[in-house]
């Protein structure tokens, strides 16, 4: 008896064509949706929303008291919104641009408001925090009521807004205070 012939194993042909077809279909679908996105997407228009803070003092939108502290082109666009004053505010003196160790910009102005110191500080806390400013210090070294706010400017520098109350000349119905804005000398 002769041993049976060993037959070679059965082979099947594996085609890569179905996998290539699926990959090709995925690439075509991706390209189609990218074209649709380019045609349909008109971009996002960024707008600045001015917050409305309910209660407390109102913003005096028509005031020009701090215009010299915000000359056109001197401040980054995201910083200008922090230059606000409450209603019933008037000047106690001229603008001063001391550049006292701060960065390239430093401006302050003495003002008086017909409100209490706590209402004035509450106004700035509410308004500036709603505009993206962070309160990082309260109370001056001399004991005067003071708030310091900080915000990163689009010019890569931190900006500081300070509101300092003069307690010796203020009363329950009138507050002498100073508004100051300056560019911090350190970059973000």
Image (cartoon, helix red, strand yellow):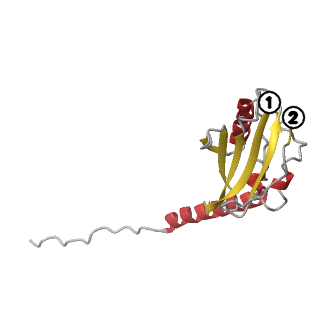
Residue occupying image coordinates x 71% and y 64%:
104
Q: Position of residue 4 (x, y in %)?
A: 16, 70
Q: Position of residue 187 (x, y in %)?
A: 61, 62
Residue occupying image coordinates x 67% and y 46%:
133
Q: Quadrant of residue 111?
A: top right
Foreground of the two, 93 or 156: 93
Q: Quadrant of residue 184?
A: bottom right
Query: Quick check: 9 left or right of 23?
Result: left
The numbered mark, 2 or 1, whose residue comes first in the sequence reads: 2
Foreground of the two, 121 or 23: 121
Q: Are marks 2 and 1 in contact (CB under 8 Å)?
A: yes
Residue 153 vertical placement versus 134 (above, below): below
Residue 1 vertical placement versus 58 (above, below): below
Q: Position of residue 34 (x, y in %)?
A: 68, 61
Dot 1 falls on a residue whose secondary structure is: loop
Q: Position of residue 170 (x, y in %)?
A: 76, 33
How far apart, in angstroms, are the residues tagged by discs 2 and 1? 8 Å
Name the image quarter holding the C terminus: bottom right
Dot 2 falls on a residue whose secondary structure is: loop
Q: Which residue is mark 1?
A: 115
Residue 10 vertical placement versus 167 (above, below): below
Q: Which residue is mark 2?
A: 88
Residue occupying image coordinates x 8% and y 71%:
1
Residue occupying image coordinates x 87% and y 34%:
88
Foreground of the two, 98 or 137: 98
């Amino acid at each position: 008896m002769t041993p049976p012939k060993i037959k070679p194993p059965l082979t099947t042909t594996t085609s890569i064509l179905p996998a290539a077809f699926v990959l090709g279909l995925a690439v075509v679908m991706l390209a189609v949706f990218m074209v649709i996105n380019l045609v349909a997407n008109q971009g996002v228009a960024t707008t600045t929303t001015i917050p409305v803070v309910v209660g407390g003092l109102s913003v005096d939108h028509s005031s020009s008291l701090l215009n010299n502290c915000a000359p056109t082109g001197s401040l980054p666009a995201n910083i200008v919104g922090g230059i606000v004053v409450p209603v019933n505010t008037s000047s106690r003196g001229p603008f001063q641009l001391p550049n006292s160790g701060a960065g390239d910009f430093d401006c302050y102005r003495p003002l008086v408001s017909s409100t209490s110191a706590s209402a004035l500080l509450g106004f700035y806390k509410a308004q500036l925090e709603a505009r993206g400013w962070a309160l990082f210090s309260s109370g001056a070294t001399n004991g005067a009521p003071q708030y310091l706010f900080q915000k990163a400017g689009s010019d890569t520098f931190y900006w500081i807004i300070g509101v300092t109350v003069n307690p010796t000349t203020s009363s329950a119905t009138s507050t002498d205070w100073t508004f100051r804005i300056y560019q911090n000398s350190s970059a973000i």
